[in-house]
Amino acid sequence: MPDLGKYGTEVLSAYLATIALLAGLIALTWLRARRVRAALEQAEARKKNG
Amino acid sequence: MSIWEYANPRKFMGWTGRLVPVFVVLAAVLIGVGLTWGFFFTPDDYRMGATVKIIYIHVPSAMMAINAWVMMLVASLIWIVRRHHVSVLAARAAAGVGVTMTLIALITGAIWGQPMWGTWWAWDPRLTSFLILFLFYLGYLALWQAIDDPDTAADLTSVLCLVGSVFAVLSRYAVNFWNQGLHQGASLSLDKEENVADVFWQPLVVTMVGFGLLFVALVLIRTRTEIRARRLHALEARERMG
């Protein structure tokens, strides 16, 4: 860990906020992609089976 | 083959399905390398101290906040001119990524500004235009949610995107238009004298490329989801009609 001197709180909080927001964005993107894909597969299966 | 054929939904799903994993891996590697390099292996700045390390997240996110809107503008114009559905779905997909990048830039800028300027916020031209851009992103996303008919939503959000482009441009060039305010000029410029020092510049470029690739990967994934969601909506509507 580098010595951040008197600015440790500022630097770490900026990085943590960024990581949290990016992780949230990636998680939401992935979860919605998975949910829509599963729903579409079910709908196409229903269509195929009449 | 015409370039427009790549935007045919079926073809788009094919070629993007192969490209997404490549972009995801490259983005993860470059962001990992750039942030590790910048955070652990660069010195403090003689004026800003360790806060200079915030540059590796603040500048790439601000850059992508503006570039995302520019991409949305191009996609919206394609929709308006050619009525190409995939283009407007890509614009919608980019908005979610762009609003997050704008929020990151605003938050990290405020955290950086407090120790350097003595305030979290100032009504400086660049900060203010960035805040308005953030509000335009929220309005754009809300408009998509508020309108049921997808083509009407695409028309109205495209017009909103054109109007908001003024603030995307201002966010980038406000410091040049108004020679006032707290925010410094461009961190990276073709003018060598304006650039940050090489020791900070190199990891910054790596991180910026990484953020760019992350943006592309997320937009492709989200556009694919929007295409599937539209197909699902059509199938469900057909089921309801019996």
Image (cartoon, rainbow, N blue to C red):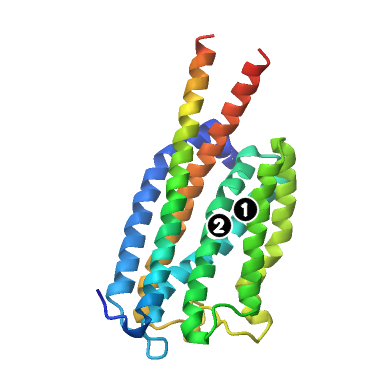
Which of B80/B105 is in front?
A: B105
Which quadrant, please, contains the C terminus of chain B? top right
Tell me whether the residue at label 1 lies in contact with that at label 2, contact meaning CB atoms closer than 8 angstroms.
yes
Which quadrant, please, contains the N terminus of chain B? top right
Q: Residues within 10 Å of mark 1 (few under 14, many from 20)?
A: many
Q: Residues within 10 Å of mark 2 (few under 14, many from 20)?
A: many
The answer to whether residue B1 of the structure is visible from this angle is no
Relative height, residue A42 to residue B74 (above, below): above
- Which labelled disc corresponds to residue A44? none
Residue B116 is situated, as x and y percent measured from the top left of the image, at: 48, 85
Residue at point 36%, 82% (across, down): B50
Question: In screen coordinates, is B81 left or right of A44?
Answer: right
Badge 1 sits on which subunit?
A: B
| Disc 2, SS | helix
- Which labelled disc corresponds to residue B72? 1
Which of B194/B233 is in front?
A: B233
Badge 2 sits on which subunit?
A: B
Q: Quadrant of residue B139?
A: bottom right
Residue B28 is situated, as x and y percent measured from the top left of the image, at: 35, 55
Q: Amino acid at mark 1?
A: Met
**Alpha-carbon distance for marks 1 and 2?**
9 Å
Residue B137 is situated, as x and y percent measured from the top left of the image, at: 63, 57
Q: Earlier in the sequence, mark 1 or mark 2?
A: 1
- Which labelled disc corresponds to residue B98? 2
Residue at point 42%, 74% (across, down): B54
Q: Amino acid at mark 2?
A: Gly
Relative height, residue B15 to residue B168 (above, below): above
Q: Quadrant of residue B184?
A: bottom right
Q: How many marks?
A: 2
